[in-house]
Amino acid sequence: MPKTTLYDINAQKVGEIELSDGIFGANINSEAIHTLVVNYLANQRQGTQSTKTRTEVRGGGRKPWRQKGTGRARQGSIRSPQWTGGGVALGPKPRSYRFSVNKKLRRVALKSALSSKVDTGSIIVVDDLTLDTFKTKDFAKILSKFEVSDALIVTADKNENVVRGSRNIPNIKSTLVTTLNVYDIVKYDKFIVTKDAVAKIEEVYA
């Protein structure tokens, strides 16, 4: 089983914690991680982009000149795509970019992402993150003790002080075990997780 240092809120070592081999010591499947990152980003797209076709552009009802005898190319409408101000041929229309990924692949990708954090020494397990205040400057002081400027903070249950204290700090995001996703894990340099959250991750994703 992989082991990592357990810290208190002041970044002092208080012991070691054993991590589940099946979740934090799994084989890293980079293809699965890539698929889940692409899936996450695709699902965030609104897909509202739209262009007008020749039937939707205003005007162009009359044939600009007669079919034959003028010496010019035949034209049926001044709103055809080749005309300035005409419609767009094969332009984008509103659509959904969403696609589904099966549950088994999701689990493989999540375990791979978590294991990669352990492999690179980017995981920081904190005994407790109970705060007396929600002020940003106080939370920033805690992060400075860990020498962290880019991190995902994971708690077992919603901690309002952590949420409010971290939300205005650039490159810092807080989340719950139940809303953990592969994109956030690989996006941030450090993975700060509470001891309770580790236990819950191992319980939920075992």
Image: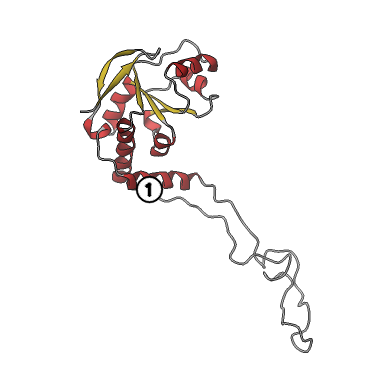
Q: Is residue 146 above or below residue 115?
A: above
Q: Residue at x 48, y 25 (%)?
A: 149
Q: Is residue 94 above or below residue 129?
A: below
Q: Which quarter of the picture shows residue 69? A: bottom right
Q: Which quarter of the picture shows residue 6? A: top left
Task: Determine which residue is flagged by label 1.
Answer: 35
Q: Which quarter of the picture shows residue 68? A: bottom right
Q: Residue at x 30, y 39 (%)?
A: 112
Q: Residues within 10 Å of mark 1 (few under 14, many from 20)?
A: some
- Residue farthest toward the top in the current orientation of the protein: 132
SS category of the residue bearing label 1:
helix
Q: Position of residue 16 (x, y in %)?
A: 26, 18
Q: Position of residue 99 (x, y in %)?
A: 42, 51
Q: What kind of residue is marked 1?
A: Thr
User: How many marks can you see?
Assistant: 1
In depth, the one of 153 and 54 nearer the eye is: 153
Kindly tell me whether residue 206 is visible in this rendering.
Answer: no
Q: How is the image coloured?
A: secondary structure
Q: Is residue 201 above or below residue 108?
A: above
Q: Residue at x 40, y 16 (%)?
A: 129
In depth, the one of 118 and 199 nearer the eye is: 118
**Apparent side of residue 177 relative to residue 172 in the rendered image (left or right):** left
**Apparent side of residue 46 relative to residue 201 in the rendered image (left or right):** right
**Apparent side of residue 45 relative to residue 88 in the rendered image (left or right):** left
Q: Position of residue 171 (x, y in %)?
A: 50, 29
Which quadrant, please, contains the N terminus?
Answer: top left
Kindly tell me whether residue 117 is visible in this rendering.
Answer: yes
Q: Position of residue 126 (x, y in %)?
A: 35, 18
In depth, the one of 112 and 150 nearer the eye is: 150
- Residue farthest toward the left in the current orientation of the protein: 1
